Image (cartoon, coloured by chain):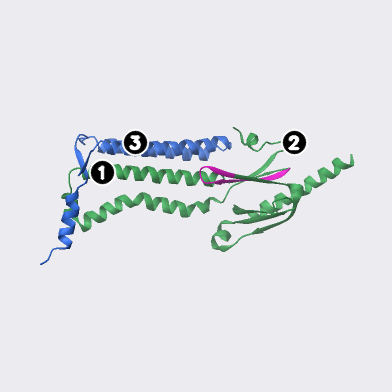
């Protein structure tokens, strides 16, 4: 399926920008992932150093048990990493010349999709906080709307000020278009 | 006393592997359904798949010499008796 089909893109609608969270926000999970991967060899090394005779005197079945347990562990860690990346990748903010669509993947089996018409936007705020946010230029974008959902908040998006300006320009363009349509 | 053949471990492993496959299918279906199967997600999927194949292959390689007909004692009442014996031994 194409993204345009997924968001039911109208014929006059064009996707202006697709925004995901800044890749730098993946770094903590990446560190955890690397630590989890390094754990079995580290534990083995520690055991060999601290209790060298104990490991040699284990029953002959024990290595097979350890290998199977380690294999299950590594498969689980790999799956955790993959699922985490997809959770990041499937969270998407789509800006079109008509609306903003916020797709939020909630774990493996849930997804929340919210959208707001550009004409319903009342106010927008972009905020960059902290050392990391300032260094890598990412932050929060809040959209105040006149719709049922009063506020949309998008966290960790790259270049929030540029995105805010772009949405404001599109909203202005949209307003002009609707005014011309109502006059003619 | 509860004794199981070592091959039981393979069934447990197969169960985990199937669970892994199930989660993978769910992830892939999410990618396809949302129309986000692009180069980065393809690369991540490729890494996941190649990593999984490597792990399964390494497991098979290291377990080649294992005699799966052996039995493994999962539970023995004597262990408790011995344990209690060591705790409550009066010197």
Identify the residue at horizontal 26%, vertical 53% (top origin).
A45
Q: What element carries label 2?
A: loop
Asked if residue A93 shows in the view, the reply is no
Seen in the picture, residue A123 relative to B37 is either above or below; the reply is: below
Farthest residue to the right: give it. A183
Which label is found at residue A12? 2
**Do the residues marked 3 and 2 share a common chain?**
no
What x and y, as percent, mark residue A165?
71, 53
Q: How far apart are marks 1 and 3 (CA)?
A: 14 Å
Does residue A29 show up magenta in the picture?
no
Identify the main secondary structure in magenta. Answer: strand
Q: Do callouts 2 and 1 mark residues in contact (Cβ within 8 Å)?
A: no
Q: What element carries label 1?
A: helix
Q: How crowded is mark 2: few (under 14 residues within 10 Å), some or many (20 or more)?
A: few
Name the N-terminal-most of marks 2 and 1: 2
Q: Give the range drawn in magenta.
A: A98-111
- Residue pointed to by mark 3: B14
What x and y, as percent, mark residue B70?
19, 37
Which label is found at residue A65? 1
In the rendering, what colour is chain A?
A: green
Mark 3, mark 2: which one is toward the viewer?
A: 3
Q: How crowded is mark 1: few (under 14 residues within 10 Å), some or many (20 or more)?
A: some
Q: Give left or right: position of B5 versus A90.
A: left
């Amino acid at each position: 399926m194409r993204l345009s089909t997924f968001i039911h893109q109208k014929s006059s609608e064009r996707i202006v920008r697709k925004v995901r969270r800044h890749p730098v926000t993946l770094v903590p999970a990446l560190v955890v992932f690397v630590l989890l991967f390094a754990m079995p060899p580290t534990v083995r090394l520690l055991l060999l150093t601290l209790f060298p005779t104990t490991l040699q005197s284990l029953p002959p079945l024990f290595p097979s048990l350890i290998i199977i347990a380690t294999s299950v562990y590594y498969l689980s860690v790999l799956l955790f990493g993959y699922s985490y990346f997809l959770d990041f990748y499937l969270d998407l903010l789509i800006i079109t010349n008509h609306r903003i669509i916020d797709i939020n993947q909630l774990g493996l089996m849930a997804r929340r999709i919210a959208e707001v018409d550009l004409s319903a936007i009342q106010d927008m705020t972009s905020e960059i906080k902290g050392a990391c946010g300032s260094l890598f230029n990412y932050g929060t974008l809040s959209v105040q709307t006149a719709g049922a959902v009063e506020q949309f908040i998008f966290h960790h998006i790259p270049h929030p000020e540029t995105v805010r300006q772009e949405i404001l320009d599109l909203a202005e363009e949209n307003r002009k278009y609707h005014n011309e349509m109502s006059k003619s | 006393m509860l004794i199981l053949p070592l091959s039981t471990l393979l069934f447990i492993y197969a169960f985990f592997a199937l669970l892994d496959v199930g989660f993978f299918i769910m992830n892939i279906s999410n990618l396809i359904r949302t129309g986000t199967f692009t180069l980065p997600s393809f690369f991540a999927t490729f890494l996941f798949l190649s990593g999984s194949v490597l792990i399964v292959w390494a497991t098979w390689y290291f377990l080649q010499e294992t005699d799966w007909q052996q039995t493994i004692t999962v539970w023995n009442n004597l262990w408790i008796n011995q344990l209690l014996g060591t705790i409550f031994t009066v010197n």
